[in-house]
Amino acid sequence: MSKITSLADLRNIKANVEAKMSLRERSESPESMVQIRVAMATCGIASGAKIVMDYMINELDKRNIPAVVTQTGCMGYCYAEPTIEVTRPGHQPLVFGYVDAKKADQIIGKYIMNGELLDGIIPVNYENIEGK
Amino acid sequence: MTQFKMHLLVCGGTGCRASESEQLFQSLKKEIIEKGLENEVQVITTGCFGFCEKGPIVKVMPDNTFYTQVKPEDAIEIIAEHVIKGRKVTRLLYINPETEQAVSDSKHMGFYRKQLRIALRNCGFIDPENIEEYISRDGYAALAKCLTEMTPAQVIEEMKKSGLRGRGGGGFPTGLKWEITSKSQADQKYVVCNADEGDPGAFMDRSILEGDPHSVIEAMAICGYCIGATKGIVYIRAEYPLAVERLKIAMKQAVEFGLLGKDIFGTGFEFEIDIRYGAGAFVCGEETALIHSMEGLRGEPTIKPPFPSVSGYLEKPTNVNNVETFGNVPVIINKGADWFASIGSEKSKGTKVFALAGKINNVGLIEVPMGTTLRDIIFEIGGGIKDGKKFKAVQTGGPSGGCLTEKHLDIQIDFDSLTAAGSMMGSGGMIVLDEDDCMVSIAKFYLDFTVEESCGKCAPCRIGNKRLNEMLEKICEGKGTMKDLDLLRNLSHVIKDTSLCGLGQTSPNPVLSTMDNFYDEYLAHIVDHKCPSGQCKALLQYVIEAENCVGCTACARNCPVNAIAGERKGVHVIDQATCIKCGACLEKCKFNAVFIK
Ligand SMILES: Cc1cc2nc3c(=O)[nH]c(=O)nc-3n(C[C@H](O)[C@H](O)[C@H](O)COP(=O)(O)O)c2cc1C
Ligand code: SF4
Ligand code: SF4
Ligand code: SF4
Ligand code: FES
Ligand code: FES
C-alpha cells in the first residue's frame, strides 16, 4: 500500500471504497430513496427475477439513482412473475408484473425517474411482515 | 468490479464473540461459497450493535433485517431462505417484548428508534479491522482538514464552540482543556486516552475501541496537532484483549497508510501512539493516578493542581481525555461545531452513550441526545421493566452516582440535571431496579465496591467508607438504630468533603441518595426489622400458613438444619431460631403453605 500523502490521496481511497459501501450507507435511510423489492421466491427465480434484480441494480447504479434493491419472498402474484414493487420516496408502493429487462428499463426511465405511470401495474391488497 | 447485492454484518464484539459469533461468521462464509454466492453476498465482521444480551447479532443489508441469538447452525437457513429466496427467518427475528411479535427490521425496533449515534456511528456498521471502510465513512478527513486548512487555534475554537464536554465523568469542556494544554510551554507534551473504564457494568469505551478504533486514533492526532504534542498514549485495561487487538491492528494500518508517523498529509506534522496496560484498579481511571501508573509508580491519585494539562506524564503537559470524548471529535470537525451544538440540551451538547443494565427488557449499549428523558430511555429504548414488574429506581453514574426514582422519570438528563437530582452522569452506567430490589442493599453493594477499590492513601475514604459499609451491614441485618442513620449522613458528608480524589469525594452518593429517596425503607429495616422487598436474608422469616399445610412432611424432610417440626398429616411449624433461610421448604411445598414474611 502506498502512503497517503495528501487530501487527494484520501479522497481517492474513499471514492474507491464508496461503491462497496454504498449499499450499507443507503440502507441507513431507505425511506429517502427509491426502494425496490424483487419477488425472489421459487416461481420468481424460475421466471427470471434474478436477472431482473441484477439488471435493476446495475442500471440504477449506471444512472446514478440512489436506490435500495432488496429481495423478498413470494408476493402472491405467481401468475405475473417476475414482479417487483417500487416505492418512490413519499409515494405508495406500486407493483409491476411480467418484468423483464426491457420492462425494467421502462420502469426506471419512466416511473422512477419521472413519475410517469405505465402498464403492468398490479392492484395491491397484500400485507406482509415487512409492513409492520 | 463486483457489485454485492447483500451484506451480512456479523457482530464481532466481545459479547457476541462469547457466544460463538466467530464460528457463525465462518459458517455463513462457507455456505455462501457452497451456494456460489461469493460475488453477490459479502459477509463482514463489525463491532458491537449494542444489543449484546441477545447476541450473536446478524444484520442483513440492505433490508436492515435484525437477527438475534443466531447460532452457527442457523447459517444454512439464513442463506437458503433469506439470501436465496428472500424469506426472512422469522424465528430469529427480534421479538417485541410488549406485543410479542417479530419485528422485521432494525428501523422498527424501539431500541434503535430514539437513538442517535454519533460516538457509536461506525459500531455495527464497518469492519473495524479495515481502515478503508473507516475512510469511506469520512475517516481521517477531519485530520486532513485540521492539518491542511486550519490552525491549531482554529481547531480549538471549533471544539469550544461545539460545547463538547468530557465523557469520562467530569464533564469538563474539552475545547477548554485543549486550550489550556496548548498554552503550557514544554519541549514535549502528551495526549493520553483514558480507556481504563472501571465502572462496574460499563462497556461503552470498550465497544468504541472494538468497533471503531480509528476514530480514537484520528481524534488523538487532532488533539496532538492542537496542543503541540507528537506522542499519544492509550491507557487501556488489560482485561480488554479484543479492544487491544483491534486498536493494535488499527494503529498498524494507520502507520502503513501514513496517517500516523512523520509528515502526515505532507504537512510536516508528526504523531505516534503507544499502548500502556492498566492493572484493573478502578482508581487508576482517575487521571492523576493513571499518570502515576504510566510512570511506573503506584496508581494513587495526587492533589490537583497541578492539573495534568500543566504537569502530567513525566511532569510534562498532558491532555487526558476519555475514549468516548475522542470518538466525537472527528464528526465535530467534519460536520461543524454548529451542527454538534444543535444537538442536546442547553449546557450539555451532543449525545451520551449509556450501558443499560439490570431489570430491563433491552439490556445493551445505547446512544441518545443529551436531554432525552429517563422515561424514553427506560420504557421506549429499554423496552420497559422485565417480567412486567414495577419500576423502582435507576442508578446512574455507577459507584459515584445515585438513584433516581419515579418522580425523576421526566427530567431531561444531562450533566447538570443529573447532579441537581442528586445523582451523576458518570461514565454512563445505568442500572435499572425493580420492586424486588432493596435500596439499602443496593447502597451496600456500591459501598462494597468502593471499600474494595479505595487506594487507601487518605483516611476519610479508607476508613470512612469502611465504617459506612459496616453500618449498612448492620441495618441489613436488622440491628441498625436510628442513631446509625444520623451517623451515616454525617460521616457521608465528612467523606465527601475531605477525601483527596474523586473516588472518595463521590463514594457516599449511593448512600445519601437512597436515604433521600427511600428513607422509609431504611426505617422499615431499623424500626420494623423488615426488608420490604424481601432481599435482606437476615430479615426474612419463612413461615408456614397453618390453613394451607396438609402435613405432607416434604418441607421437613428437605430442611438442611431440621428446623421444621410437625406430625405426618399435622400442621408443620418452622423454628425461627434454627432456620438458616435457605428457602428449600418454600421450593418443596406443593401446597403453597410456606411464605416469606
Ligand atoms: C475514581 C475515578 C475513576 C475514574 N475512571 C475513569 C475511567 O475509567 N475512564 C475515564 O475516561 N475517566 C475516568 N475518570 C475521570 C478522569 O479522572 C478524567 O477526568 C477523564 O479521563 C478526563 O477525560 P474527559 O474530560 O474526556 O472526560 C475517573 C475519575 C475518578 C475520580
Ligand atoms: S479518596 Fe480514596 S481512592 Fe482517592 S486518594 Fe483517597 S483513599 Fe485513594
Ligand atoms: S411441604 Fe407444605 S404442606 Fe407439606 S408439610 Fe410442609 S408446609 Fe405443610
Ligand atoms: S428456609 Fe431452609 S432452613 Fe429455614 S425452615 Fe425452610 S428449609 Fe429449613
Ligand atoms: S457484542 Fe454483539 S451486540 Fe454487543
Ligand atoms: S492508620 Fe493512618 S490514619 Fe489511622
Image: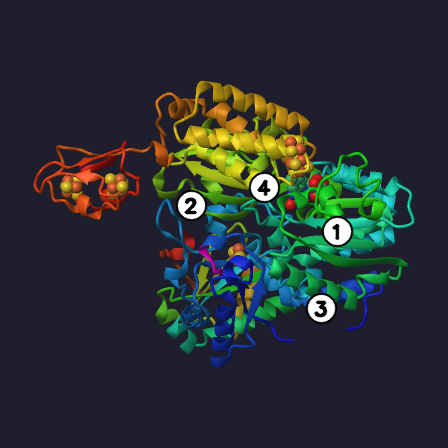
Residue B293 can be seen in this image: yes
Residue with the mark numbered 2: B361
- Closer to the observer: label 4 or label 3? 4
- Closer to the observer: label 1 or label 2? 1
Q: Chain of mark 2?
A: B
Q: CA distance from mark 2 to mark 3?
A: 42 Å
Q: Amino acid at mark 1?
A: Met
Q: Which mark is residue A16?
A: 3
Closer to the chain start, of discs 4 and 1, is 1
Does residue B268 appear left or right of residue B344 in this picture?
Answer: right
Residue B222, compared with residue B337, is above or below; it is below
Q: How is the image coloured?
A: rainbow
Callout 4–callout 1 Cβ contact below 8 Å: no
Q: Percent position (x, y) of residue B353?
A: 59, 44
Q: Which mark is residue B294?
A: 1
Residue B409 can be seen in this image: no
* SS assignment at label 2: loop
Judging depth in this view, the residue of B382 and B534 nearest the camera is: B534
Disc 1 within 8 angstroms of ligand 1 (CB): no
Q: Main secondary structure of the magenta part?
A: loop
Tell me the residue at 49%/77% (across/down). Answer: B30
* SS assignment at label 1: helix
Q: CA distance from mark 4 to mark 3?
A: 38 Å
Does residue B40 appear left or right of residue B592 in this picture?
Answer: right
Q: Amino acid at mark 3?
A: Asn
Tell me the residue at 53%/34% (across/down). Answer: B373
- Which contiguous range is marked in magenta? B54-58
Q: Chain of mark 1?
A: B
Q: Chain of mark 4?
A: B
Count the numbered circles shown: 4
